Image (cartoon, rainbow, N blue to C red):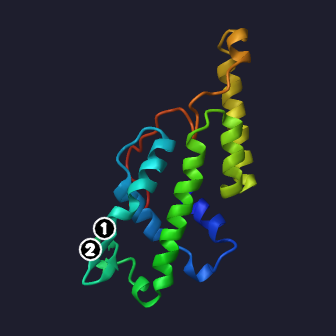
Amino acid sequence: MILKRHRDEWFAERDKDLKVISVILTTLSTHAYAGEARVSDAIAKILRDMHLAIEERNGVSWIANPTDPSENFADRWEKFPGRRESFFKWLEAARTDFGAVQRFSDTNIVLNELSRNLGSTLVEGARSRVATSAGSRAASVAPAAAAGASAPGLVFGGEDRRPTEPKGFG
């Protein structure tokens, strides 16, 4: 969902007809995801490897429907090559944008960086949830330790998150 949000923001000021369709992002993300526990690690892995699931069949880009491999989700890329080009431009932008926040450990810096690419409304909601979560953690820590805490290593949440079963398409 976060990659779709990034895509929406990135294409907001570009040709909407070239916007990468959700089923392509979902399918390629699913292929690249390898069970990473942290959301930030999963996003980094997905962005690094999602292009690997794009096959070339007789000179045609092919993203197979997982439930019907004879269906090509990238079937319009042949007729509209700008869509393929647009996918790779978006992918490079996403790699750059999410890669930029990986080097920061301060939650506020991360959220400020992300707001440019995901929209301030979404990020401010996340900021509120992080602040609430940090407040409840700080209440259980000695006051001196809590005063200096800035959630080191927190990028998209520190808890392990593993899906229990697929929900919806996938």
Check the picture and name the quadrant holding the C terminus.
Answer: bottom left
Q: What is the x, y in percent for residue 56? A: 29, 76
Q: Seen in the image, is 167 located left or right of residue 12? A: left
- The disc at residue 69 is 2
Check the picture and name the quadrant holding the N terminus.
Answer: bottom right
Which residue position is annotated with label 1? 66
Q: Vertically, is 127 above or below 58?
A: above
- The disc at residue 110 is none
Name the secondary structure under disc 2: strand
Q: Vertically, is 162 above or below 121?
A: above
Q: Can residue 144 be seen in this view?
A: yes
Q: Can residue 21 be seen in this view?
A: no
Q: Quadrant of residue 30?
A: bottom left
Q: Which of 13 and 161 is in front in this view?
A: 13
Q: Quadrant of residue 145?
A: top right
Question: Residue at the spot x=46%, y=65% of the render?
Answer: 25
Residue type at mark 1 is Pro
Q: Quadrant of residue 130?
A: top right
Q: Vertically, is 141 above or below 110?
A: above
Q: What is the x, y in percent for residue 28? A: 39, 63
Residue type at mark 2 is Pro
Within 10 angstroms of label 2, few (less than 14), some, or many (20 or more) residues? Answer: few
Q: What is the x, y in percent for residue 137? A: 64, 21
Circles 1 and 2: CB atoms closer than 8 Å: yes
Name the secondary structure under disc 1: loop
